[in-house]
Image (spheres, rainbow, N blue to C red):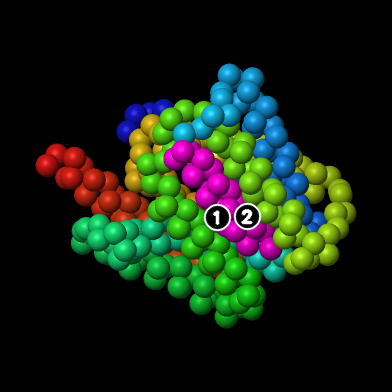
């Protein structure tokens, strides 16, 4: 992994993790699903316009169309939609920690469903990762965290894990910005349909809301997704997913700085254990991938 890939991975992890804090600010003054749909509409149109200006084509490969539609549904409409809805009552740090279980879920499903070999380091990492999350959740639930919101975040993590497993190897072929833009529009269409069914639509614009909305539209919305697709193409899904181990740390840190969310001793221990668990799982999967490549 070269320095450019490391820089891309760090940038992606930080921007992605910060999205939970900006989302928490947005849903404080606007209905979550409609706000997210509006964000995806703007991000999608910008992405498609930039792609056309770069000379990228509407003609995607069959695998790219598959990835575009599936990620639009699972990542944008379900994963982010459920998280935005949950963050009306759930702290940003809690949502970030639950979302960080995605690489653990992917590794567990790969072993259980696709019979991928899981080395001892990976087994230890899985146990540690889920134990760390359980430690944090027991502390937060004991302090009065909303169980329904926590459940929605968990369902969102499952949806993103499913999409990640389903589109393995489907991100090659170029036209990355076009893929990013189109998947945003898929998410926008679904959320515009869902918003009037599940919520009362309202927006109370103010400076914090406008800044958070602009940030989440341009950075987590466009830039982080584009970096992720380039990273997948550059180093592959398993190596790229290693950077997810930073999400609990970055997510909790950003929420503490900008929202004043407190981190108790049990939270700190849980974040540390979860982070090391995710890292162990990803390092184990990389080792297994290199072993397969050498045989």
Span highlighted in magenta in the image: 62-85
Q: Which mark, by number, is residue 208? A: none
Dot 1: element: helix
Which residue carries the number 2 mark?
Answer: 77
Picture coordinates of residue 38, whole percent (x, y): 75, 47
Asked if the stretch drawn in magenta spans residue 223, the answer is: no
Residues at discs 1 and 2 in contact (Cβ within 8 Å): yes
Picture coordinates of residue 266, whole percent (x, y): 49, 70
Picture coordinates of residue 147, whole percent (x, y): 61, 77
Dot 2: element: helix
Q: Residue at x 63, y 75 (%)?
A: 148
Which residue carries the number 1 mark?
Answer: 74
Q: Residue at x 21, y 61 (%)?
A: 120
Q: Residue at x 49, y 63 (%)?
A: 158
Up the image or down, 170 lies above or below 98; here it is above
Can residue 30 be seen at all in this image of the molecule? yes
Residue farthest toward the bottom in the current orientation of the protein: 142
Which of the 4 quarters of the picture holds residue 113?
bottom left
Asked if the stretch drawn in magenta spans residue 63, the answer is: yes
The quadrant of the image that shows the N terminus is top left
From the viewer's perspective, tell me whether residue 282 is left or right of residue 98.
left
């Amino acid at each position: 992994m070269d320095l450019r890939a490391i820089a891309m991975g760090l940038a992606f992890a930080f921007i992605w993790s910060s999205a939970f804090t900006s989302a928490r600010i947005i849903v404080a003054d606007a209905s979550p699903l409609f706000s997210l749909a509006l964000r995806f509409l703007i991000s999608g149109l910008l992405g498609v316009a930039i792609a056309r200006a770069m000379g990228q084509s509407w003609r995607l490969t069959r695998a790219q169309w598959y990835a575009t539609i599936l990620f639009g549904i699972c990542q944008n409409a379900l994963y982010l939609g459920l998280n935005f809805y949950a963050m009306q009552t759930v702290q940003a740090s809690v949502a970030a920690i639950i979302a960080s279980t995605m690489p653990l879920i992917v590794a567990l499903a790969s072993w259980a469903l696709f019979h991928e070999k899981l080395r001892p380091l990976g087994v230890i990492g899985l146990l540690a990762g889920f134990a760390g999350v359980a430690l944090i959740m027991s502390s937060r639930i004991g302090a009065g965290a909303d169980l329904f919101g926590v459940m929605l975040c968990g369902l969102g993590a499952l949806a993103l894990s499913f999409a990640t497993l389903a589109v393995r190897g489907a991100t090659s072929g170029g036209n990355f910005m076009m893929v990013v833009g189109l998947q945003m529009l898929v998410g926008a269409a679904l959320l515009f349909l869902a918003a009037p069914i599940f919520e009362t639509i309202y927006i109370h614009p103010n400076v914090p809301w406008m800044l958070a909305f602009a940030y989440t539209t341009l950075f987590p919305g466009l830039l982080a997704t584009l970096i992720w697709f380039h990273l997948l193409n550059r180093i592959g899904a398993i190596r790229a997913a290693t950077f997810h181990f930073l999400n609990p740390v970055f997510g909790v840190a950003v929420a503490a700085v900008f929202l004043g969310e407190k981190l108790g001793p049990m939270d700190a221990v849980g974040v540390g254990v979860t982070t090391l668990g995710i890292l162990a799982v990803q390092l184990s999967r990389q080792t297994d991938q290199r072993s397969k490549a050498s045989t």
